[in-house]
């Protein structure tokens, strides 16, 4: 394994973590030359995902330092390879979590390349030729066009960035359960954070009755008055839980902290589904009785494929859905990561990468 190969000749300025302190500092490195299937993208914005924090501090034990985080990348194409189709210089584009996949397995052939066994992450991954991938905390990226999406003109580029991770993560389970094209269901969203607030927006846009389930009573006004949720359940309130028993068709659980599933499962109707997109550090306890006496299902998933991501972005343009963001300059990345660890953001940080190049 090497960090670069002989074709890595493009010098790029970025920001990286170098050890488990997780501190992000300026870092200059090399990217590969633009190949026949590649596009070169001048990065303008990059969202900060909680995953970036985990990698920066090596909390999962798999970080390859130095790590350049960032998988919510928005920019403009400045160069295209000879075999690139559907993209041209000047296009507004995005790059999410994927850098590559095998393109030949059953998952790749059915537009589910995110589940390919050989899928390469956009950062902290090992690319085909053995180099380590570096992400969007940088001024330029070279990406295979097959893992690039168009950003509709009506979407603001900064607020579109988190859609490439948080957005597609909550959109995919809705699509999988026919909740995009078929309105009129009752859905629940557990947690009102970066993923949860987008899930509420999608649910309302697609015509559903949306209930937010949260441990924080203080979020009720935000959920109902600003995001448009129909109901709000405090998950520690037994009466509210009892009153809402067997009332929801589908629940999307976005919480990454340890939390009990029993009260959530009891909110589902018979044949209802609980879908997990959060990633708690410790295993969750899964009680059997709510499942077998309610014919309920528990599932989970990650991001979607590229085709689905493009579909999501087009629907976001149609319904004017963007993430609620706080834009920062690159010199504030460490401060933002510290605040993110404390959930002190409403609801996603986005780095104005272009601000660094204009200084």
Image (cartoon, grey):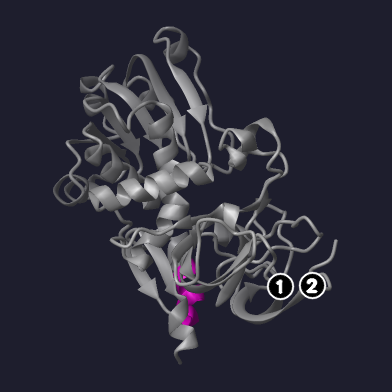
The quarter of the displayed image where residue 118 is located = top right
Contact? badges 2 and 1 (CB < 8 Å): yes
| The residue stretch that appears in magenta | 330-337
Residue beneath disc 1? 33
What residue is shown at x 22% (from left), y 46% (from top)? 223
**Point 67% across, 70% down: residue:** 34
Taking 334 as reference, is 260 above or below it? above
Residue 152 as seen in the image, left or right of residue 33: left
* Residue 257 in view (yes/no): no
Kind of element beneath mark 2:
loop
Label 2 neighbour load within 10 Å: few <14, some 14-19, many 20+: few
Q: Secondary structure at mark 1?
A: loop
Q: Is residue 347 above or below residue 213?
A: below
Quarter of the figure with the N terminus = bottom right
Toward the front, the furthest residue is 82
- As drawn, is 177 to the left or to the right of 3? left
Residue 257 got which mark? none
The residue under the point 62% across, 58% down is 122
Among numbered discs 2 and 1, the one appearing first in the sequence: 2
Q: Nearer the viewer, residue 183 or 33?
A: 33
Which quadrant of the structure image shows residue 324?
bottom left
Residue 206 visible in rendering: yes
Where is residue 196? Give x, y as percent: 35, 45
Question: What numbered label is drawn on residue 7?
Answer: 2
Instruction: Residue 319: give x, y in percent of width and height.
Output: 24, 48
**How far apart are the alpha carbons under marks 2 and 1?**
6 Å
How dense is the environment of label 1, judged by Cα within 10 Å: few (below 14), some, or many (20 and up)? some
* 93, 62: nearer the viewer: 93
Q: Is residue 77 above or below residue 10?
A: above
């Amino acid at each position: 394994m090497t960090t670069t190969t002989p074709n890595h000749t493009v010098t790029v300025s970025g920001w990286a973590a170098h050890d488990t302190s997780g501190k992000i500092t300026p870092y200059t490195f090399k990217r590969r030359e633009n190949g026949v299937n590649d596009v070169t993208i001048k990065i303008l914005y990059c969202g900060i995902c909680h995953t970036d924090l985990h990698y920066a501090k090596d909390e999962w034990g798999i970080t390859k330092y130095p790590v350049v985080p960032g998988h919510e990348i928005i920019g403009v194409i400045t160069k295209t390879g000879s075999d690139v189709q559907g993209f041209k210089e000047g296009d507004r584009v995005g790059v999410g979590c994927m850098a590559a996949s095998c393109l030949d397995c059953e998952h790749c052939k059915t537009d589910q390349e995110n589940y390919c066994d050989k899928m390469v992450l956009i950062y902290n991954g090992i690319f085909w030729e053995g180099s380590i991938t570096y992400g969007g905390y940088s001024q330029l990226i070279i990406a295979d066009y097959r893992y690039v999406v168009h950003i509709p003109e009506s979407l603001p580029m900064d607020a579109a960035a988190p859609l490439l991770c948080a957005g597609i993560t909550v959109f995919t389970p809705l699509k999988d359960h026919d909740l995009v094209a078929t309105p009129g269901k009752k859905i629940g969203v557990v947690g009102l954070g970066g993923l949860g607030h987008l899930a509420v927006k999608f649910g309302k846009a697609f015509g559903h009755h949306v209930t937010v389930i949260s441990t924080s009573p203080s979020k009720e006004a935000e959920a109902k008055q600003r995001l448009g949720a129909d109901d709000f359940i405090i998950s520690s309130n037994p009466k509210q839980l009892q009153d809402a028993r067997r009332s929801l068709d589908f629940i999307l659980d976005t919480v990454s902290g340890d939390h009990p599933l029993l009260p959530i499962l009891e909110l589902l109707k018979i044949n209802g589904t609980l879908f997990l997109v959060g990633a708690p550090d410790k295993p969750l306890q899964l009680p059997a009785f709510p499942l077998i006496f309610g014919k309920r299902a528990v599932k989970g998933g990650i991001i979607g494929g590229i085709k689905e991501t493009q579909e999501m972005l087009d629907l976001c343009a149609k319904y004017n859905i963007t993430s609620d963001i706080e834009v920062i300059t690159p010199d504030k990345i460490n401060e933002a990561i510290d605040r993110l660890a404390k959930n002190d953001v409403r609801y996603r940080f986005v780095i104005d990468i272009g601000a660094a190049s204009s200084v």
